[in-house]
Image (spheres, rainbow, N blue to C red):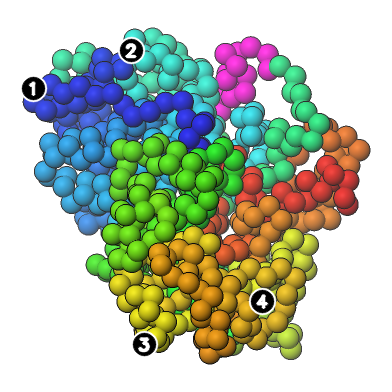
Amino acid sequence: MSTVQDLNFGFAELAWNDDNQPIASRFNDVYFSTTDGIAEKRYTFLENNNLSQRWQQQSASHSSFTIAETGFGTGLNFLLTWQLWLEARRLFPDCAPSQLHYISLEKHPISWRDLKRIWQLWPQLQPLSDELLDAYPPLPTAGCVRLILNRGLVHLTLYIGDAATGLRQFSPCSDRNNAAPKNMSFNGMQTSVDAWYLDGFSPARNPDIWSHTLFAAMARLSHADTTFATFTSARLVKKGLVEAGFQLIKKPGFGLKREVICGNFQGTRNCAAHEQGNRKTPPRKIKRGDTSDHYWHLQELRTRTEQTSTEREANQRPIKSALVIGGGIAGCNTAFALSQRGIQVTLLEQSAGLADGASGNRQGVVYTKLSPHPSQLNQFNLCAQIFANQYYAQKLNGTSLFDRCGGATGVLHLAVTTNQVEHYRKLAQHYDDCPQFLQWLSPEQASEKAGVELNHPALWLPNSGWLAPHSLCEQLTSPANIDLRLNCKVAKLERWKNAENGDQETEQWHAYSDSGDIIASADTCVIANAGASQQFSQTAGLPLKPIRGQVTHLSESAPLAADWQLHKLSTTLCGRGYITPVYDGYFSFGASFNLNESATELNPDDHQVNLDNLASMLTHVQSSQQESLSDTLEGRVGFRSTTPDYFPIVGPVPNQPHMLEQFAPLRHKANAIIDASGSYYPQLYTLLGLGSRGLAYSPLAAELIASLICNQPLPVDQQLYRYLHPARFLIRNLIRSER
């Protein structure tokens, strides 16, 4: 996903025929058969990939199935695949995969409004299309967007952009898209696609998509059981597929179409050479201080792509159990993401209750700092906000997390400076066709939304809101396969083979108490306990900094609440501070930002700062008159855990001594070429440094952790992943010769 300035394409340009069916004006081509689009798609892609038969015969250990598609278009292929998967799950519950992962690539996405119109053509798909429409992201926004559907069992990853470039984001490569050596992967396991839908417009009308780069990327993501299907039988398509290692089968086409082709992957070829059109790859050059062509974020591959599915299952043991250390927002979201994938989770929290540390405020806002300016941090903020809005709105047992644990009241980002007015206006103009995501409001319009008179114009996010962290954490840890253990402090982590399980070859992580006893053991471990992570030898070197914050609590019956008419507040306000609607008889507002302070007691001066910031948002309010009140206000002190670059730390934990040795040449030559993967503790991950944006950051960060652990497609661009990666600080410090 990129920012406004990076965007060089827009919505699909549509024309409509007499039957109210869409035509792609840009390519002068149809999206589906004008006679029977559903039958055409089912035959061409679902039947020719043998999905129904394969899902009846899956082994029990094959828990997920991944499909990749070139050309999301109207989304009809996805809706039909989802429908078929649900039918297979109903008829063959012991065989059909428990999770469906669907990657779709689209350079010219159809707008939300046009999709709503198109999906009305297929009332038989309405329950699915309605759910997809509710989750559909604001577009056009370049890059990866992950959608969670069907109570977490269906994951749709949209890549908005060039298809070949998009596919490369799901296979190991450098930031500059140089393909990584074949022995590297994201997590030590081979990420692969089980079936391909090649559904771009015909080569005659859209030749750019059918490239050497596309076919090479397909080969890199395929295994011995991977199949493909496509409507086109053009010579260049067949030639590209054969050269990439696919076997072709001709079949009769649908309707007036003479033939289509399908087939399966026969084996890997020299993908890098094929990607250059069989030309010699030019020498790599790296600018001084640039690590974009290094592969430090990757791990050594432990299995071979030539193996069959049976061999892969025998040699690549699935993760069945996980330890999560930390019962705050980060740990609880991680535990939930893993539990949805069928993993047995043991959640260890040292306090007597959940959300007792930095996550312990009465209320929190789903907030990130949005900006139209191009930067990786702005990109991540946008990704996280979009994902969090959808994540908290998804219905679990009929009710959303917003409804259970807070309120989808919308959030007003008040523009309190001239720069903010300019930036928010520009951002809102970009999303002019996506009012369900954000809108620009005048002070009068913002006041109407808020229920109180406001001093400033605002960016309005109608699908965001506030949550009570303690209630949220209780809901996230409610699944039966999460074993919550409170008052459980972990003093040390070690990994070794657990012979007591009767399997001499199984290594597990073991959590020890202060007395040296083993508290719990599991296949994988996630450290998500904020600053307390510094006590573990494996994560002691990660740069975390505590920042004190004080929140003010004001009773709704207090005279000040009546004077300032806070009882009328119907949404969440964010300006120089924030305030949430009343909850359990109190308003929460703040929070102070105190560097280099460690006091845990409430400070009247910080209450006054919070009052002043609140007053600055409201019309006709003078905070100076309330100075005496600040001594009697209630509140809470917490310590945010932040990082030097303000990105959270998400991913595998680096083995620092080994990596310092591997990448030592960077100390002396910042542009040294090092074709080596990083060195990481096996199956040890971390989610830390969320700062004051835990509610917004943690859902996407937890989804990334779970995807890595379960060897599933990443929910973010590979380039953005490197900015979140725990090893980034080590590499930067080597280049700066700080170690």
Q: Which mark is residue 511?
A: 4
- Among numbered discs 1 and 2, the one appearing first in the sequence: 1
Disc 3 designates what residue?
A: 557
- Among numbered discs 2 and 4, the one appearing first in the sequence: 2
Return the residue nearer the eye: 362 or 417.
Answer: 417
Q: Which mark is residue 18?
A: 1
- Among numbered discs 1 and 3, the one appearing first in the sequence: 1
Q: Amino acid at mark 4?
A: Ala
4 vs 3, front mark = 3
Q: Is residue 478 left or right of residue 702?
A: left
Over which residues does the magenta segment extend? 267-281
Return the residue nearer the eye: 238 or 103.
Answer: 103
Residue 189 against residue 570 in the figure, above or below: above
Residue 508: percent from the left, percent from the top?
A: 64, 68
Magenta stretch: includes residue 160: no
Q: Is residue 455 left or right of residue 329?
A: left
2 vs 4, front mark = 2
Q: Which mark is residue 355?
A: none
Disc 2 designates what residue?
A: 205
Return the residue nearer the eye: 410 or 243.
Answer: 410
